[in-house]
Amino acid sequence: MATLPVFRWHLAPDGYATRRQLRARDLRPGGQDVAAQLERPRRRRPPLVAYLYRVDLALPVRPMTPARWAALARANAARRRCPECRRDAGYVIPASLGMCVPCAYPGPDGPEGSC
């Protein structure tokens, strides 16, 4: 296995980009392996590492099809539905609670009237 070139933070040559930088250019890695890595030193801890991909090998982002838009809408709707009262909470249910806020902290009337 070949070792990756390692660059210090902010010192990577042109032609390399992180996943986020590729996405900002409407590109994706496209199945290529990691080409290099950045290391940001930290005191008394291991360095932060960012993986770099070659921009010339990156492919354009796949367009969203109507079926993918529909699947994304269903997934977001499921994140808003409370598993306790089965109602749309109007916001994404916090994972820390696992249910909508009125069900997690019921008032004197109970969760039925407050959801």
Image (cartoon, grey):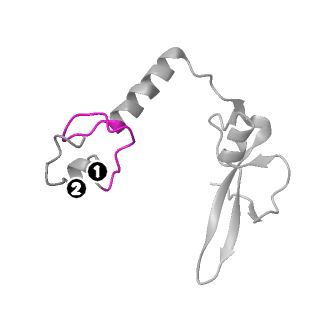
Where is residue 4? Give x, y as percent: 69, 57
- Residue 71 appearing in the image: yes
- Position of residue 37 relative to residue 93, above or below, is below
Q: Report the amino acid beneath label 1.
A: Val
Is 67 placed left or right of 22 in the picture? left
Q: Residue furthest right?
A: 14
Q: Report the amino acid beneath label 2.
A: Tyr
Residue visible at 18% across and 54% down in the picture: 107
Observer-nearest of 99 and 35: 99
Residue visible at 25% across and 49% down in the picture: 102
Quadrant assignment for the N terminus = bottom right
Residue visible at 45% across and 20% down in the picture: 70
Q: In the rendering, which numbered label is found on residue 105?
A: 2
Q: Residues within 10 Å of mark 2 (few under 14, many from 20)?
A: few
Q: Residue furthest bottom?
A: 44
Quadrant assignment for the C terminus = top left
Observer-nearest of 16 and 108: 108
Question: Do the numbered discs 2 and 1 sit on residues whose CB atoms are within 8 Å?
Answer: yes
Q: Residues within 10 Å of mark 1 (few under 14, many from 20)?
A: some
Callout 2: helix, strand or loop? loop
Is 102 placed left or right of 90 in the picture? left
Callout 1: helix, strand or loop? helix
Where is residue 9? Give x, y as percent: 75, 65
Observer-nearest of 81 and 10: 81
- Part of the protein shown in magenta: 80-96
Residue 40 sits in quarter: bottom right
Is 13 placed left or right of 101 in the picture? right
